[in-house]
Image (tube, rainbow, N blue to C red):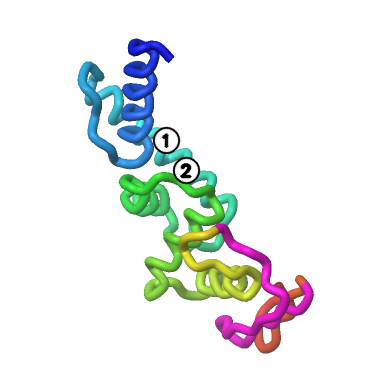
Amino acid sequence: MSEFDAGLAAAQEALVRAMTAGGPLPEGFDAEAVGAAAHGILLKRAGEVARAWPALAASYGASWKAAFAAWAAERPTRGSFRDGWDFARGDRGRLAGDAARELALAEVRWSYDGQDPPRPRGAAARRVPGGAAVVFRGRVRVFGRGRSG
């Protein structure tokens, strides 16, 4: 790789970091234009996470995109499922109803330490709002009040 190509690759990498993970703006780029692009990317991420975590997004109502964008502004994406899970875990204390249930059902279905990709659980039990959820061999059963997962 030539010196020019290496420099271009480094500038592109820095630009992507600035737009997706709150990295510093590389020299020679319009801060306003990069900021607008970064904001658009954050809103797109919020929409993708809302599709993966609909109850979580619905629990925020009209403030969902702003709340998620503020949280995600300096975090690179790890995929909409993990981004939603990380966001929900960080805001666990405010979650209620369907959003709390959505998180609890994810936690009974998947093993996730916040670092490595989630892995399906063979067997587990967790409290969910209104009852308990049990997973065995990939099948989830919810006991108590509410819907079955």
Which SS class for mark 2? helix
Identify which residue is drawn at 69% across, 76% down. Answer: 147
- As drawn, 48 above or below 95: above
- Residue 126, position as x, y percentages in the image: 60, 83
Determine whether label 2 and label 1 are within 8 Å by CB. yes
**Highlighted range, magenta:** 117-137
The amino acid pointed to by label 1 is Ile
Q: Which residue is mark 1?
A: 41
The amino acid pointed to by label 2 is Arg
- Mark-to-mark CA distance, 2 and 1: 6 Å
Identify which residue is drawn at 31% across, 33% down. Answer: 18
Q: Which residue is mark 2?
A: 45
Identify which residue is drawn at 38% across, 66% down. Answer: 90
Q: Quadrant of the N terminus?
A: top left
- As drawn, 142 above or below 68: below
* Label annotation for residue 147: none
- Residue 69, position as x, y percentages in the image: 36, 47
Left/right placement of residue 95 relative to residue 123 reads left
Location of residue 6 (image quadrant): top left
Identify which residue is drawn at 34% across, 53% down. Answer: 71
- As drawn, 69 above or below 135: above
